[in-house]
Image (cartoon, rainbow, N blue to C red):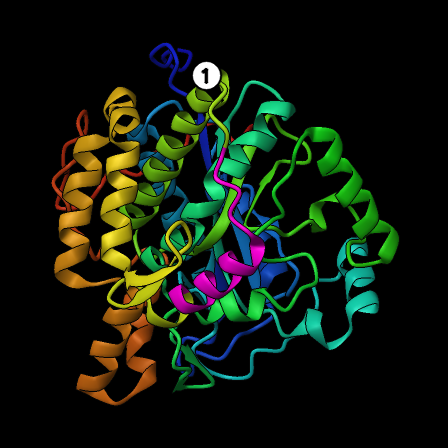
Amino acid sequence: MGQPLPPAGVPTVGVEEEFLLVDPATGVPVPRGREVVAAARERFGLDLDHELLAAQVEAKTGVCHDLAQVRRELVAMRSAVSRAAGEAGCLALAVGAAPLGEPAGPIADLPRYRLIARTFGRLADEQSICGCHVHVGVPDREVAVQVCNHLRPWLPVLVALTANSPLSRGRDTGYASWRTVVWHRWPTAGPPPYFSSWAHYQEVADLLRESGAATDPSMLYWDVRPSCHLPTVEVRVADVAAGPTEALLLTALVRALATTAVADVERGVPAPAVPTEALRPAGWRAARDGLAGRTLDVLSGKQVPVRHLLRRLVRHARPALSANGDLDLVERALAALHRVGCGAERQRRLLARTGTPTDLLDVLTADAPDPLVPAPYPGERRAGGSWPVPLGASREGF
């Protein structure tokens, strides 16, 4: 039976999640990506991708029409990744940055990654960081560029909302999202420029490749960008979520922002021309403070609580959330998140109680209990106390 058709006007979505492979006893990253990829394919029917470091893997949903489908695929993926890691003698962590051990590691033995390592040196092998990327379908690349412009002001809020990497080398970094700080070392990372057209985007992309700052189109690492091979806008600003509900929340908000942006583009409403020099410090402050702190409101130029900006984001996207059928999930997930805090807050609370960073490992595994433990999404029911985990979902697309 084919996938049900989405409601008219509701864009498709896809989610990519990166996971860190660590020693079960010490939490130190281990280069077992090849073994985990093989075990996932052979034992659990899941195709994983290698990442830059051999201690990472990436899982992708198919092209999804609603959040219930996204949830099923995320839970199935995380279960399979965890079991495959167990087969390879390691743990798969859903955490934005390696909390223990050295952040450097061997590069995955693939031609593209060997080229990146030769080009960027030590920068490449200190990337024990894991993100979550959300793709949203758009009509064409010209619209995609304008949608990216409309999403730029919301990037700092999404950084704070998803912050899940406060530790490095077993110590608190002082940042809620250390992944963001490490990631922004790349010359093509961070908030993108404001592009006037697809042609303008291509001009800048060509310039970056000519300079050597990007070895190929996939190395345009901006926080939001038109996909280089799909008819989507890709938001790349988030730490990988500790649980599937936080990933769903991010997916719903990104899709609603993109839906709103497409409507604005079609009506001729221009995006706010927020300068990159405002977005960059706003993103830095959001990465430092997380959901409970403050950051720069890039529209007013004033420092405000992150939760204030999050409420504004939800108001802005509320009609699209409702039209997409995602409003109920977002309201319940946000209520739970406000109660328990973002991933960085939860890690710090646990560490304050135990004082032992390895105690974090059990709660950071890819298949750990969902920290937000919501009521089932419409159309799903709990079975045996856990979410159903079908593995037959399509892998095409994202």
Q: Residues within 10 Å of mark 1 (few under 14, many from 20)?
A: few
Q: Amino acid at mark 1?
A: Arg
Asked if residue 70 is among those painted magenta in the image, a careful observer would answer no
Q: Residue 171 at what x, y percent from top left?
A: 40, 87
- Residue at the spot 78% in from the left edge and 61% down from the top edge: 116
Q: Residue 115 at what x, y percent from top left?
A: 83, 60
Q: Residue 5 at what x, y percent from top left?
A: 38, 11
**Image-quadrant location for residue 15:** top left
Query: Is 252 situated above or below 116?
Result: above
- One can see residue 88 in this view: no
**Image-quadrant location for residue 368:** bottom left
Nearer to the camera, 374 or 359: 374
Look at the image and give the residue range highlighted in magenta: 271-286
Nearer to the camera, 337 or 294: 294
Nearer to the camera, 385 or 318: 318
**Horizontal arrangement in the rendering, residue 204 relative to residue 312 (left or right):** right
- One can see residue 324 in this view: yes
- Residue at the spot 21% in from the left edge and 57% down from the top edge: 371
Query: Is 272 situated above or below 136?
Result: below
Label 1 belongs to which residue?
Answer: 267
Q: Quadrant of the N terminus?
A: top left
